[in-house]
Image (tube, rainbow, N blue to C red):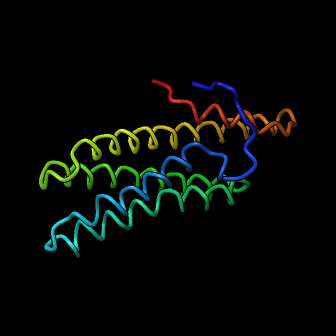
């Protein structure tokens, strides 16, 4: 595992964005098409919406990183969508037995993403407070939120 902290120049540099974007593509192409037709307007739509929302909200939050409340609200929304995705994938796995192993891996990924988003929120708050007392342009501090603190 590479522990080198890289500077964050855009939302594309955030591991949590990259991982949730890739996972959303997997869900959209490998899980949703296999859901039963009777779930088209319920589980299918919810899962489609929530997996697309997580990386979108991360990107939007990054653009509002200079606004504490705006950033925090969007990161909170991304965590909520990530947790909704976990529940929907759990329903898919347990009720319909669709791609059970893949769903378990995706559930783990979204669980990790929720923790990373929480840590990113804390790190950004601490970074903003630290910048007010000691000016610095070193955004590598934010990369600490990207590590999984188990």
Quadrant for the N terminus in the image: top right
Task: State the residue in front, 110 or 99.
Answer: 99
From the top left corner, tell me how far across and down residue 132 is, in percent.
81, 39
Q: Quadrant of the C terminus?
A: top left
Q: Residue at x 54, y 62 (%)?
A: 56
Examine the image and state in which quarter residue 88 appears. Answer: bottom left
Query: Residue 44, how many percent across, how many down?
Result: 26, 68
Count how many numbered circles sit on residues in the image. Answer: 0
The residue located at (43%, 57%) in the rendering is: 24
Front residue (pair 106, 131) = 106
Pick whichever, 71 or 133, lies toward us: 71
The residue closer to the viewer here, 144 or 30, is 30
Residue placed at 52% from the left, 57% from the top?
A: 55
Relative height, residue 58 to residue 13 (above, below): below
In the displayed structure, 149 sits above or below 106; it is: above
Q: Quadrant of residue 73?
A: bottom right
Q: Farthest residue in the right direction?
A: 135
Answer left or right for 4 relative to 33: right
142 lies above or below 36: above
Q: Residue 133 at what x, y percent from top left?
A: 83, 34
- Expressed as whole percent of the image width and height from the top left, the position of residue 81 reads 40, 56
Is residue 47 left or right of 52 when viewed as pictured?
left
């Amino acid at each position: 595992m590479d522990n080198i902290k890289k500077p964050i120049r855009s939302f594309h540099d955030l591991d949590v964005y990259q991982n949730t974007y890739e996972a959303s593509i997997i869900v959209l192409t490998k899980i949703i098409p296999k859901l039963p037709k009777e779930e088209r307007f319920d589980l299918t739509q919810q899962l489609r919406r929530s997996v697309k929302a997580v990386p979108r909200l991360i990107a939007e939050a990054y653009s509002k990183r200079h606004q504490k409340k705006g950033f925090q609200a969007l990161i909170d929304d991304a965590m909520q969508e990530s947790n909704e995705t976990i529940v929907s994938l759990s329903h898919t796995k347990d009720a319909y037995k669709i791609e059970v192993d893949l769903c378990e891996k995706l559930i783990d990924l979204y669980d990790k993403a929720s923790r990373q988003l929480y840590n990113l929120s804390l790190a950004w708050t601490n970074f903003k407070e630290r910048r007010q007392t000691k000016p610095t342009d070193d955004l590598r501090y934010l990369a600490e939120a990207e590590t999984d603190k188990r």
